[in-house]
Image: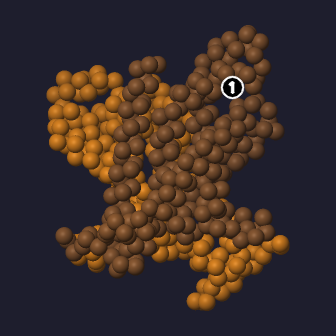
Chain colours: A orange, B brown
Amino acid sequence: MSWDWQVFLNDDGSGRTYLEWMIDAWGWTLAVAGSSWVVAVVMGALMGTLRTLQDSPWLVRLATVWVELFRNIPLLVQVFLWYFVVPKMFPLFQQVPGFVLVVFALGFFTSARIAEQVRAGIQALPRGQRYAALAMGFTTAQAYRYVILPMAFRIILPPLTSESMNLLKNSAVAFAVSIAELTMFAMQAQEETSRGVEVYLAVTALYMLSAFAVNRVFATIEKRMQIPGFIVAGGTGGGH
Amino acid sequence: MLGLDLTFLSWDIISKFVLGGLWFSIKLTIIATLGGIVFGTLLALMRLSGKKALMLPATIYVNGMRSIPLVMVILWFFLLIPFLIGKPIGAEVSAIVTFIAFEAAYFSEIMRAGIQSIPRGQVHAGQALGMSYGQNMRLVVLPQAFRNMLPVLLTQTIILFQDTSLVYAIGAYDLLKGFTNAGKIYGRPEEAYLLAAVVYFVICFALSWSVKRLQAKIAIVR
């Protein structure tokens, strides 16, 4: 078998080359992953924080239910739920574009994992930090806003890095509801051109490149945010 | 209820569509876990061997697998296996091979952390007793590493069980496919997705609850 990279310059039948289509698809992948990341971090920070409010058992329960619910259903099934079931049960959602529904699915799924990291980060802080803040006359909200969360976020940056890379990889499931992202492109272009290896190689390379970029961005943030005197564990982090 | 009708589901439909899919999902999870642990341990030992000729390929393999989406790995294997063995292959067999190869990369990272968590004194004590590298690994290090890593291994298995739903990409007949097929044939696709979610949730929640219990037990003994 010989290589045929020319295939990317072929017309895909709608006046654009496969290369242009692939770049578009890359854009969709980044858009899905980026928007979901915002949803995931906001909801994850909120739910992770709520889980540490020992004085409000109902808020703790609410956040626990949130985490268990979104953590124990496969992502693909959650995508189907948002895309097919939610609009059927709540007609209001029939106006919402598919892209947004997928962002909800991916964002909420990831928020459950980030909530666990946030909770662990908050609980890893010495209790004295909280007491010191309260002794200074801070309210609970102020203590979280000015003392606890800024520290907790620095602690969880390494696992948050790998979770963000996971989110990027997980955005591939959007193919199942026909979002025109990289995996969807890979499957369709493979079928149309029969040059599966070239197409898959290019798509795989773009995924690796994107994941690497995410990794570098977070490494920079981690360096910039370092507080002198606090040793924040380095390393690449594991996870899935 | 909210425009849904869940009454279409009968035992007949479940046994006809769902059970076969559930069985394949479970089979895939178990085979991929066992295969993944075997090959993952080998990869971990290669990476910890200190010999460049062994470390480099293992590192490239593990990092490569971990930086691409599982869906793409599934598609890759489905494309390449028939090409390599020269005959078409079923989606189910392809899925099993893919998941073993993919999970090996993740299990190897877990095993590596587990092996590194064993104090060096244990290795030295084994060496002082005259054990060979193989004996030391088999009799001293790995049993303790497995024990330390058991909760993480089981958690990874739960994630693996959820990930098996991604064989959707190549059309293998798993638990999710069982529900979607039933939903299509009886004209109730939304209800079928909802029921699939409930079944996955019950299984995964029960499993992760058991892992938590186990973790507490092991922690006390240690």
The residue under the point 79% across, 69% down is B86
Circle 1 sits in a helix, a strand or a loop, which is it? helix
Which of these two is toward me, A215 or B15? B15
Residue to which mark 1 is pinned = B138
* Figure check: B193 above or below A48: below
Which of these two is toward me, A143 or B47? B47
Q: Indicate the quadrant where residue B82 lies.
A: bottom right
Total residue callouts? 1
Mark 1, Cα crowd under 10 Å, few <14 / some 14-19 / many 20+, is few
Q: Horizontal placement of A66 versus B220: left or right?
A: left
Which of these two is toward me, A32 or B213? B213
The residue under the point 69% across, 25% down is B137
* Figure check: B27 above or below A64: below
The residue under the point 29% across, 24% down is A127
* Figure check: B114 above or below A30: above
Residue type pointed to by label 1: Arg
